[in-house]
Image: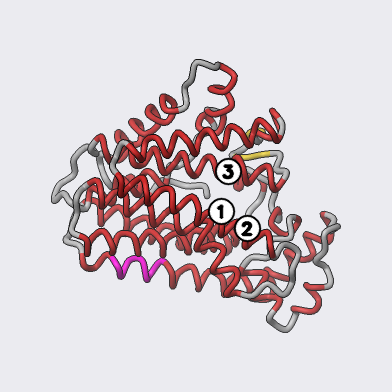
């Protein structure tokens, strides 16, 4: 999603994310220049680094005033981001994607085999960093990688399935997206040695935000253009991934009309017609309402924490997330 990083309300966040960027590059630098080039490809392409930002902000809820992040918080954030990047390498292979973040995908430039191996390498580096932060963080990250796989597989099981239910959709995004954002916040709480109640609240926030984040991303796939997305609009429809706006439309008055357009051989004009139906049917507004409900639940979870720059940053992120998609859809 385009726009300013809302975590910038924390004065030290810019410097902290610069440290994240440096450690990301360093963590995947090897004696093999070719592997280094592939592993750094999406790092160099940029990104808002939402997940490491959440780890740092979660750790900052232990502080009454703004301060630079601890080394452990930065390293935890890097580990989480490497898991995210590794999953993107694998996702692009499965989707046969040609672009990611406005640049060639790794599989498009170097082929599927190298992309898979590079993705595995990023996951291995993430696990190595997590191990250095202690058994609890290492176990959490390993479990989260497993949950990511489960969520992605559940999505693949129901590709090109107009009967995909909202429950199945929510289970899938809980695994493939929300689990990692929940883990990002939990790692911040662990390395900051927060009370368990506070760490649990941060985990709930991260997971709720992640649910909202994926719903918003799925809405943007329908309402945004290729320049804004960094990939072709309507890509989910082409891949047979029927997301919440589509599922809500299929359940409505124009459901049969939309279902008749969906197939493995959907062409651009048919895809655009399907998008038009979803936009006109209220599916977008219904999905945004769900995203807002998830974001509200995340903010409510933070109520047990004392005021801090970290809480301010996380709350701003939740507010910005849904406000931004409402603006894009208007």
Alpha carbon separation for disc pair 3 and 2: 14 Å
* Residue drawn at (74%, 68%) of the image: 161
- Image location (x, y in percent) of residue 104: 66, 33
Alpha carbon separation for disc pair 2 and 1: 6 Å
Which label was assigned to residue 149? 1
Q: Is residue 14 left or right of residue 308?
A: right
In the displayed image of the protein, which residue is found farthest to the bottom? Answer: 253
Proximity of marks 2 and 1: CB atoms separated by less than 8 Å = yes
Q: Nearer the viewer, residue 36 or 280?
A: 36
Vertical order, 125 against 285 (above or below): above
- Residues shaded magenta: 295-301
- Image location (x, y in percent) of residue 216: 53, 61
Instruction: Point out the tag, 1 or 3, that comes first from the N-terminus.
Output: 3
- Image location (x, y in percent) of residue 186: 32, 54
Q: Nearer the viewer, residue 273 or 76?
A: 76
Vertical order, 249 against 205 (above or below): below
Count the labels in the image.
3
Q: Which residue is mark 3?
A: 88
Of labels 3 and 2, the one closer to you:
2
- Image location (x, y in percent) of residue 138: 36, 45
Q: Residues within 10 Å of mark 2 (few under 14, many from 20)?
A: some
Q: Secondary structure at mark 3?
A: helix
Proximity of marks 1 and 3: CB atoms separated by less than 8 Å = no
Q: Secondary structure at mark 2?
A: helix
Which label was assigned to residue 35? none
Q: Which residue is mark 2?
A: 153
């Amino acid at each position: 999603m385009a726009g300013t990083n809302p975590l910038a309300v924390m004065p030290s966040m810019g410097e902290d994310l610069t440290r994240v960027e440096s450690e990301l590059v360093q963590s995947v630098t090897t004696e093999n220049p070719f592997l280094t080039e592939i592993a750094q490809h999406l790092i160099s392409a940029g990104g808002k680094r939402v997940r490491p930002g959440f780890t740092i902000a979660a750790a900052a809820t232990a502080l009454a005033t703004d301060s630079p992040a601890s080394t452990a918080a930065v390293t935890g954030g890097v580990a989480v981001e490497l898991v995210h990047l590794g999953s993107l390498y694998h996702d692009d292979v499965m989707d046969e994607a040609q672009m990611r973040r406005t640049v060639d995908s790794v599989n498009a430039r170097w082929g599927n085999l190298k992309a898979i191996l590079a993705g595995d390498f990023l996951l291995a580096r993430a696990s190595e960093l997590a191990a250095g932060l202690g058994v609890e963080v290492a176990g959490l990250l390993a479990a989260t990688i497993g949950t990511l796989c489960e969520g992605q597989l559940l999505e693949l099981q129901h590709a090109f399935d107009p009967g995909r239910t909202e429950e199945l959709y929510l289970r899938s995004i809980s695994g493939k997206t929300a689990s990692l954002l929940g883990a990002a916040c939990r790692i911040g709480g662990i390395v900051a040695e927060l009370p368990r109640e506070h760490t649990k609240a941060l985990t709930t926030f991260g997971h709720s935000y992640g649910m909202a984040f994926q719903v918003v991303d799925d809405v943007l796939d329908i309402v945004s253009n290729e320049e804004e997305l960094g990939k072709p609009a309507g890509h989910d429809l082409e891949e047979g991934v029927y997301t919440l706006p589509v599922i809500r439309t299929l359940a409505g008055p124009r459901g049969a009309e939309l279902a008749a357009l969906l197939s493995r051989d959907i062409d651009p004009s048919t895809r655009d017609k399907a998008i038009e139906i979803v936009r006109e049917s209220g599916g977008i507004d219904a999905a945004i309402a769900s995203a807002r409900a998830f974001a509200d639940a995340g903010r409510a979870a933070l109520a047990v924490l004392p005021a801090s720059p970290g809480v301010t940053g996380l709350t701003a992120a939740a507010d910005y997330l849904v406000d931004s998609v409402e603006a894009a859809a208007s």
